Image (tube, rainbow, N blue to C red):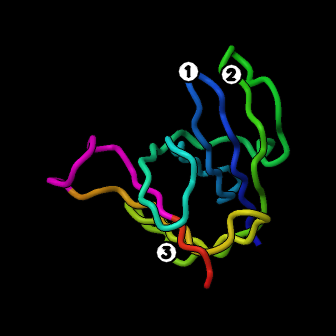
């Protein structure tokens, strides 16, 4: 099963990097607020990261702050399209359906922004 990691990234403030293993790299989104189940949170798609971040904690090269692993586990992809990703997360803290989607034109937010929402299993 593919793996995921959630890193708390302290750099110019704090955000949380959700990284999903796919095709030999980590598809990554920065989530700009603490994750609360059922709440839509602003997120930003980032460049793919190296698989080493599945295990990495500490100083990020190039003066880009520090990261601390908050959770890790495996996931099952349910939807994996250009503007929508839905996965079933099985970590120690993140358990349930995670949706990431890009708002359509005319909705609020910058055109490249994403939205993240976690729904815990009942």
Does residue 73 lie above or below 57 as drawn? below
Neighbour tally class for label 2: few under 14, some 14-19, many 20 plus, Cα within 10 Å: some
The secondary structure that most of the magenta stretch takes on is loop
Does residue 102 lie above or below 11 as drawn? below
Mark 1 or mark 3, earlier in chain: 1
Label 2 element class: loop
Task: Tell me the residue that label 1 is attached to.
Answer: 12
Q: Is residue 111 magenta?
A: yes
Does residue 14 lie above or below 28 as drawn? above
Across and down, in percent, residue 44 comes to 45, 43
Mark 1 or mark 2, earlier in chain: 1
Q: Between residues 71 and 103, which one lies in front from this camera angle?
A: 71
Label 3 element class: strand
Task: Tell me the residue that label 3 is attached to.
Answer: 79
Tell me where residue 12 sits by quadrant: top right
Residue drawn 51% across the image and 71% down it:
86
Q: Is residue 120 magenta?
A: no
Mark 3 or mark 2, earlier in chain: 2
Residue drawn 77% across the image and 73% down it:
1
Residue drawn 79% across the image and 23% down it:
59
Across and down, in percent, residue 83 comes to 37, 61
Bounds of the magenta span?
Answer: 105-117
Task: Find out whether the residues at labels 1 and 3 contact each other: C-beta distance under 8 Å.
Answer: no
Task: Tell me the residue that label 2 is attached to.
Answer: 65
């Amino acid at each position: 099963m593919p793996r995921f990691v959630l890193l708390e990234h302290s750099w110019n403030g704090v955000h949380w990097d959700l990284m999903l293993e796919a095709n030999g790299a980590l598809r990554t989104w920065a989530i700009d607020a603490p994750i609360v189940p059922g709440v839509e949170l602003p997120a930003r798609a980032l460049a793919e990261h190296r698989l080493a971040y599945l295990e990495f904690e500490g100083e990020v090269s190039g003066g880009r702050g520090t990261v601390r692993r908050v959770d890790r586990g495996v996931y099952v992809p349910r939807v994996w399209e250009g503007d929508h990703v839905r996965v079933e997360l099985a970590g120690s803290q993140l358990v349930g359906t995670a949706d990431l989607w890009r708002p359509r034109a005319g909705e609020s937010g910058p055109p490249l922004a994403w939205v993240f929402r976690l729904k815990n299993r009942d």
